[in-house]
Amino acid sequence: MNETLKRSLSGAVYIILLLASILYSTESFFILFGVFLVITIYEFCALVQINRIFPLIFGTILYSSITLLSNYNQETTAFLNRLFLTQLDLSINIIQLNRILLAITLVVSIKCILFLFYDSVQKISTSAKYLYLLGYITLPFVFITKISFGVNNYNPKIIIGLFILIWTNDTFAYIIGKSFGKHKLFEKISPKKTIEGFLGGIAFAIFAGFLISKLYIEPKPEFSQQSIVIWTSIALIVGVMGTIGDLIESKFKRIAEVKDSGSIMPGHGGILDRLDSVIFVAPIIFLFYQILNYVS
């Protein structure tokens, strides 16, 4: 099969599956990203060369537990009480839980950024591999599900808008970088990325954020100004942090001496290759929403 056709078909399947799960229900969204998490853990373990069994079990249990406790606390408590004929009290302070998980994730994110400047051939310690697995891979998937709720109820427009911004940034960073790029952004890790492409991707992402806020998220005039500020800010975060997330994954692949994290998507690589930007952006967007909620 022609490589371009193969890439187009696998990309179309990915987008259709993504949009269908997000739009169908909250549960289908949780399940799909749970599956994505399992695949991503599998791919990351292969990249850093650690045993997959424990990370897969731990990641699945952690994701499922936090999702159930955060979004179905009363239902989970009632089910366990019926199952074990007890009167358990599983009420938890979700805000405190979110703060703890966010703090862990942000600390690891900072470590990931510093990791970009390490010697490219430096070996990663076993403890660091598991730390990255927790804060760089597993917990960001939890925040992907959390940001879909904004500051209130599940809103598929939020997560779809986020993916549109990421795709816009990636696409125009590539186009502008290929057409006008002369100055390398981070040559020792990603030789093809340029400063021109980086800035161009951000500019088009901000424009896309403006269009999303005006035409998709809040078409009502009385909310348009606030929505524009929020979504252009999110676009700026996506442009900067999404690029950093892409570079971090490229660093792991460069150390492992592989082109892609996997081969599950013909022509595109692995799931981690497709989600490297969003998993690094998600905790920052969640923090942004918490700040907005606090201020308002």
Image (cartoon, grey):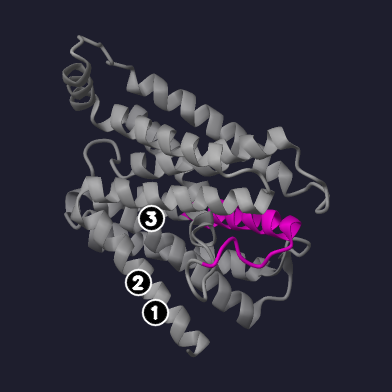
SS at circle 3: helix
Q: Say which quadrant the C terminus sits in.
A: top left
Region of the chain picked out in magenta, as a range: 236-263
Is 136 magenta? The answer is no
Is 251 magenta? The answer is yes
Q: Which residue is mark 3?
A: 162
Q: Are marks 2 and 1 in contact (CB under 8 Å)?
A: yes
Please tell me whether residue 241 is drawn above or below residue 254 in the rendered image: above
Residue at left 75%, top 42%? Answer: 124
Residue 3 screen position, x and y as percent: 52, 86
Please tell me whether residue 9 is drawn above or below residue 189 in the rendered image: below
To which quarter of the image does residue 131 belong? top right
Instruction: Compute the Cα span from label 3 to label 1.
Output: 22 Å
Q: Which residue is mark 2?
A: 13
Residue at left 28%, top 36%? Answer: 151
Residue 259 screen position, x and y as percent: 66, 68
